[in-house]
Image: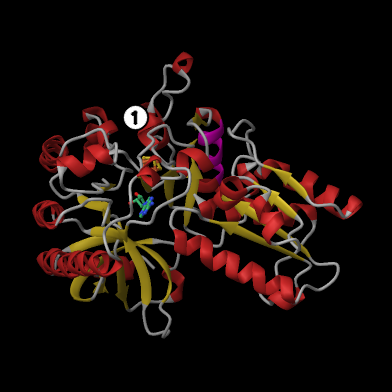
Amino acid sequence: MNELDSEIIAGILTKRGLSETTDETLADLLIFNTCSIRDLAERKVMGKLGKLGRQKKRDRIIGVTGCMANAKKEAIFQKLPHVDFILGTNNIHDLNCLLDEVILTGAQSIRTDEEFTQELDYIAAKRQDKSKAYVSIIRGCDKYCTYCVVPYTRGPEVSRTPQSILEECRELVAQGYKEISLLGQNVNSYGKDKPEWKYLFHDLLYEIDKIEGLNRVRFLTSHPVDISRELMGAIRDLPSLCEQVHFPLQAGSNRILKKMHRLYTKEEYFEKVALLKELVPDVALGTDIIVGFPTETDEEFEETYEAMRQVRYATSFLYTYSPRKGTPAMRWVDDIPESIKAERHQRLLDLHREISSELMAEKLGQEVEVLVEKRSKDGNYLRGLTRCWRHVLFEGADSCIGSIQTVKLTGYSHQTWMGQMGKASIETL
Ligand code: 5AD
Ligand code: SF4
């Protein structure tokens, strides 16, 4: 979501007549689109902003946007008086007004609404990628997991109208985009905040699937409690929907899940995974896991480890618990020593590597559909993305970039496959 917001900010500024520079020292305007999900992300930005303050050039405007703007508000001005404006996650549409204010008055300005209200000019987004695009469908989160700042920094769930989403998707396809990732903190809640629409997430997916020329649709993220049978059916039945689901477990112990306010038990989670695997046998599952949540015992961590082994996730985002101000989990002592958190984290990383190698080996010799993205860094190969969200390197001509090709998987190294473009694909070029 942050990446998309950065692209929208870049689009608004381009429309205003500004141009982008890669040389920071030349910039007249610097915007830090921040993340608050863990402490490290915040500390990095604070460090960088502090350094800029010691060398501030006159006439340069510095702005802070994103979750940190909502989490810290005016406290940013107190700590960093050289920051000119603070613009929250729900106020991106105010960027031009705020800039005018700063330029005209020279005074510091701030806008941090609690709730997302305005429809943004999404079409203005300036995207770096030419074949894949993010499309926001719902903002905010009503789930209130006890460790998470998002419900406080992004506010309650607000769905975007189906008309606006479909318009943007059609426009992207007209521009040549082949793959769209539908974004939301919890996409499965889509439409629930607007019962009068009588239009839910799977309704949206069925309509997006009808857009001609759109080869691939993904979505992230889903809360396991809201993954319905209808949604699983849509993944099975809709040709555009990729067989890949991010299904964040967070922890494998029922006591910790309850303390995290995740609203499901390990058994309920496994049941959904089993049903999904039954309906979509080739599905690639992804997860987020937090280790070292307050009071997590060795035995409880072992349950997470076993859950990972059992589900065999293709992708895993593994985190150590980071206490966040304002969240309910702050009332518990962060009692797991950092060394134990790091040890648990490493064990999961090792297990993930083992499982993902097994999964990759199982697919060798198969032909897969690849969206060709760009040339690899060393220039020797083309790099593409499979429907199950893995990269493949293979030989081919630049003219394939942006197209969908069939590639035979011949080997792998770490998380990347090696492949050979199918004969038929080469002949059609
Ligand atoms: N500490 C560690 N990880 C966190 N996440 C969210 N909040 C925290 C926190 N306080 C992780 C969750 C979430 C992902 C985006 O970030 O796993 O799914
Ligand atoms: Fe945070 Fe939980 Fe909402 Fe995800 S579902 S954004 S972890 S509160």
Give the structural element (helix, strand or loop) at label 1.
helix
Q: Nearer the viewer, residue 284 or 212?
A: 284
Left or right of 205: which side holds 270? Answer: left
Kindly tell me whether residue 254 is visible in this rendering: yes
| Residue 398, picture quadrant | bottom left
Which residue is identified by label 1?
202
Q: Position of residue 409 (x, y in %)?
A: 20, 70
Magenta region includes residue 16: no
What kind of secondary structure does the magenta stretch mostly adopt?
helix
Q: Nearer the viewer, residue 404 or 44?
A: 44
Q: Position of residue 286 (x, y in %)?
A: 25, 53
Give the extent of the magenta segment: 164-171
Quadrant of the picture in which ligand 2 is shown: top left
Q: Nearer the viewer, residue 369 or 76?
A: 76
Residue at the location (17% across, 68% down)? Answer: 347
Residue at the location (53% across, 47% down)? Answer: 172
Q: Amino acid at mark 1?
A: His
Answer few, some or many: residues within 10 Å of disc 1's Cα (few below 14, many 20 plus, some between 14 and 19).
Answer: many
Instruction: Work out which residue is located at the far top of the displayed protein and give it.
Output: 196
Q: Position of residue 24 (x, y in %)?
A: 69, 75
